[in-house]
Amino acid sequence: MYMRKKIVEKVLWIALIAAILYTIKNLLFTHVLMTFKVPTPSMEPTVMAGEHVLVNKMSLGRRIFDVGDCDSIRHGKIIRGYATSEPHRGDLFVFNETCFLGWDTIAFDMMKYFVKRCVALPGDSFYIDSCRYHIVGSDEVLGLSESQEMHEQMTRDTAYVRHVGMPYATLPFWDKLGWNVRNFGPLYIPQKGDTIYINEKNMRIYRKYIEWELGHKIVWDNNGFSNPDGSPIKYHVMLQNYYFMCGDNTTNSLDSRFWGLVPEEFIVGKVILVY
């Protein structure tokens, strides 16, 4: 009888510990951590297709969605909790896709995620020179130099590029600027509070971000730029921080060079482990 009581007590203790561990795991993966499987080779060789990444959702502050607002995923109704770290160039981030409705607009896809390397932070001026990534005023090495060198060699021959169908032109896809994967920018990365003046060049570059923040389209005609009600718009004060994200597989990555900047509220968190 005594032995049976001890066995029952031991089983109950094991069940209690298991329940506590299960609860802790659920709390961690609800509020702190998240895992993702990487489906494409865009981050190779850093993250291979099929590998998983563990993400710290607290790094920039856990996102809290205003579920009572049907537009919460588009118009800045996402609240961030306490951030455990500052973002840095070179960090790997997981974020929601921004361009599933087209490259000329921003939209939030809750069910689709990208993992890329941050190469430019809010307030940076980013440029590409012969396929190498740079920040104005900084000597910091950005991304994988070997991959960028390989891309430079492959894109010297524009006939070859056309033959293999390799992306060459980049945002804002405006002939007057002529930006491409070899030579791009400088592009200023907006930060919260920046004033962007409304002119043709800025509209080519920043229009979709400004329209996303405003929640409506900007009308552009012979009279200049205006809101849908006809009132002129001369400038816009940015409501979000933005980031420039690139894949380490420079020759085979659709990233910010093509679909543009990532608003901070789209970022899930920082990758802390690849497995």
Image (cartoon, rainbow, N blue to C red):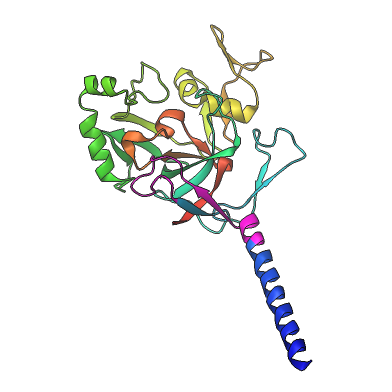
Residue 33's spot in the image, x, y percent?
A: 57, 56
Camera-nearest residue between 185 and 156: 156
Camera-nearest residue between 79 and 53: 53
Camera-nearest residue between 128 and 191: 128
Dividing the image into 4 quarters, which one contains the N terminus? bottom right
- Figure quadrant of residue 157: top left
Residue 116's spot in the image, x, y percent?
A: 43, 43
Residue lying farthest top?
222
| Vertical placement of residue 157 versus 58, above or below | above
User: In the rendered view, does 51 fall on the left or right side of 154?
Assistant: right
The residue stretch that appears in magenta: 26-51
Dividing the image into 4 quarters, which one contains the C terminus? bottom left
Residue 225's spot in the image, x, y percent?
A: 57, 15
| Vertical placement of residue 109 versus 61, above or below | above
Q: Is residue 66 visible?
A: yes
Q: Is residue 121 visible?
A: no
Q: Is residue 257 magenta?
A: no
User: In the rendered view, does 60 fall on the left or right side of 18?
Assistant: left
Residue 82's spot in the image, x, y percent?
A: 62, 56
- At 49% across and 19% down in the image, what residue appears? 199
